[in-house]
Amino acid sequence: MAKKILCTGAIVLVAAFFCVAACTLITPQWVYQVSIQGETLGLVEDLDEYITIVEGVQARAEAQWQCDLIMNEQTAAARVRMWSPRFSSPAVTAGIEDTATYKTKGWAIVINGEIAAIVDTEQTARDVLEEVKAHYINEKKNCSLLSVCLREDVSIKSIAVTPEVLKEKEEVFSMLVCGQAENKTYVVKRGDTLSGISRSQNVPLSALREANGLKGDIIQVGQVLNLQSSKALLHVETVEEVTVTETIPYAVKYKVNPDSSVRPDTVAVAGINGLRTVTYKVVRVNGQEIRRQRIKSTVTKEPQTKVVLTGIGYWPARPKGMFRFPVNGGRISSYFGVPRPGGRRHTGIDVPRPRGTPVYAAASGTVTTKSRSSSYGLYIIIQHSNGYSTRYAHLSSFADIRVGSTVVRGQIIGRVGNTGNSTGSHLHWEVRRYGEPVNPLNFFGN
Ligand SMILES: [Zn+2]
């Protein structure tokens, strides 16, 4: 009897098992079919798993880009009934990862209506603009900043962008200041030529000249050349007050001293430069001064005028060079270099002598000019060796000499007079070296 009951129980159990198994096979199961943009990726068991997968993919992307992201594509989990579903969460994860693209919120720096750069936060954008301004502010002690502004119309606005376009602050700074992310340079080596560098660096010669402000092709070893022109995107205008100490150059006064013993260029009073404190308003654009206006000037030390006694001394001429004195006796009424009206300077020395006094060739040479002009009157030019020539002006007459003929030192070439621009009978005598007037008294001692 007991055996029969046991047997029946076993049958019932087996039947129940088969019944449950059959039910499982026959009854479909609720699962979730995940898709992205309508593309089916696979099945997951429940919504929690779907959410975990999507959030995981996004979190990994955000970790990679280091910013908050919004997925551009739409993912969906549809509840479906299925007999013996095959779950495939790895395939779902991979499918989303492969398809997903993202956008993020970026902050664009807009210059004159055009986006110049995009950074991650509004603060970064503001910071980089402040850094560009600060870059051009003069920190020198004698400068005080009155104003700083950007010449361009600059704004910051929020936009949705792909995370790849976000730039680091340093890169944006360089772009705004140099016009490029990186300032490429080249250091000139021995044997380099500008055209050689142009070829090796693949930069047109004209661009190379422009980027370095070169007029010719002259470069020096060790010189750092810009390989690109830098075109700053932003122009920072600073207005500063600069106070500097300036030298006031002393004036020179020539004073005639009748004392015969006074030598030329005797300094009676030494010249001392003065000083003044000057305040300028200086306008710079990107550090380059474009305007300077003097707003205040205070003399802190008056200059002392140099007084030079030109004297009218007897001429105690003792030759110490190639020339003899062109007249006998006399004294010098006007020295070499003395200022003349119109900003000119005396190109020779004047020796008053009575009309008709003989004028001697100061050294042997060839007569190259025997002529008359409104300023020199009758005058003679003699060419000597070593590039020297001598001129004798305001003559009353010429001796019997010809242009092209040679004269010897001490030969009479003419007579003292008062022709041309002259206010009394005197000899104006010049010494020139390669056409440049030099002081004739350099060739004489006391
Ligand atoms: Zn003269």
Image (cartoon, grey):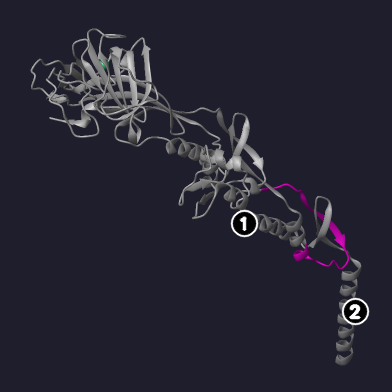
Q: Residue 362 falls in which quadrant of the image?
A: top left
| Residue 5 tag number | none
| Above or below 434: residue 82 | below
The one nearer the camera, 103 or 248, is 248
On screen, 158 above or below 153?
A: below
Q: Is residue 420 left or right of residue 213?
A: left
In this view, the residue in front, 38 or 211, is 211
Camera sees residue 265? yes
Task: Give the Cα separation between the discs numbered 2 and 1.
Answer: 57 Å
For the magenta stretch, what is the residue range?
Answer: 70-91
- Residue at the far front: name it: 400
Q: Determine whether the residue tagged by mark 2 lies in a helix, strand or loop.
A: helix
Residue 31: x %, y % from top left: 81, 61
Observer-side mark, 2 or 1, equals 1
**Residue found at x 76% / y 64%:** 89
Q: Label 1 near label 2: C-beta < 8 Å?
A: no
Whole-percent x and y of residue 2? 85, 91
Task: Give me the disc on residue 64.
Answer: 1
Q: Pick whichever of labels 2 and 1 is earlier in the sequence.
A: 2
Which residue was labeled with disc 2?
15
Give residue 393's position: percent from left, percent from top: 29, 16
Q: Ligand 1 falls in which quarter? A: top left
Tell me which amino acid carries mark 2: Ala
- Tell me which amino acid carries mark 1: Gln
Q: In which quarter of the view is residue 359 placed?
A: top left
